[in-house]
Amino acid sequence: MVRGGRQTGLALWAALAAPGAWAQEQAPDGGAARAPRSLEPVVVDDLAEFDAHLPTYIPIEELRDDPEAMRLAIAEWSSPEAEVTRQAFRDRVVAAIDGIATGAEGAASAERIAIVCHGGVINAYLTGVLGLPGTLFFEPIYTGVSRVIWRKGHRQFVSANEAPHLGAPRRPALSL
């Protein structure tokens, strides 16, 4: 977990649970939608970031301070030789998230499912939903919310990178 990740996640959780702090949506009973507070997180190994196997993790904000390291990382991930790895990563992520959604269908508590993960995982899933080539098309911000509606195996893209809880928008670190 990124240093401060737990605190950032808890701030998002509080923002999602606060009345009026998020886009107004209606719960099935007509009340305002709220995040449940009694759920325990579950780790899904297939939602690990593409570089989770590496011995160290360098956050994007540190990587962008070293233009040469950033260039090498992007070149390695986007190289033709890495295509098999990229597609295997995307296939794994899409199958895992679709499996979570399928498993929750019909459950009374499954009106909303929150999946917290790294930016590469978000990109991989959304490129699958949108039918885009590759696995990266935008830079998710920490605690940004991307939404997909799932009904009976049909996925509908709703949004990417929502962050009203963060105030002013931040400039991306890189162009993809």
Image (cartoon, grey):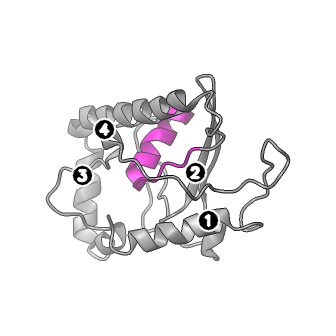
Please, what is the three-letter code of the amino acid marked with disc 1? Ala
Q: Which residue is disc 4 drawn over? A: 86
For badge 3, the amino acid type reads: Ala
The image's mark for residue 163 is 1
Residue 131 in sight here: no
Counting from the top left corner in percent of width and height, residue 113 is at 57, 44
Residue 124 position (above or below residue 35): above
Label 2, secondary structure: give it: strand
Residue 153 sits inside the magenta stretch: no
Give the mark, 4 or 2, whose residue is nearer the N terminus: 4
Residue pointed to by mark 3: 52
Q: Residues within 10 Å of mark 2 (few under 14, many from 20)?
A: some
Whole-number angstrom distance, CA of label 2 to CA of label 3 = 21 Å
Q: In this view, does 50 lie to the left or right of 93?
A: left
The quadrant of the image that shows the C terminus is bottom left
Magenta residues, start to end: 113-131
Q: Which of marks 2 and 3 is nearer the N terminus?
A: 3
Which disc, if any, is residue 130? none
Q: From the viewer's perspective, is the residue at label 3 or at label 4 nearer? A: 3
Q: Which secondary structure, mark 4?
A: helix
Which residue is found at the position 33% from the left and 33% from the top?
Answer: 87
Residue 52 place in picture, x, y as percent = 24, 52
In the rendered structure, which disc, 1 or 4, sits on the residue that comes first in sequence? 4
- Verify CB contact (< 8 Å) between mark 2 and mark 3: no
Residue at 33% over, 71% down: 64
Tell me how far mark 3 sits from mark 4, CA to CA: 14 Å
Distance from disc 1 to disc 2, alpha carbons, whole Å, reads 9 Å
Q: Amino acid type of disc 2?
A: Ser
Residue sitting nearer the eye, 120 or 48: 48
Q: What element carries label 1?
A: loop
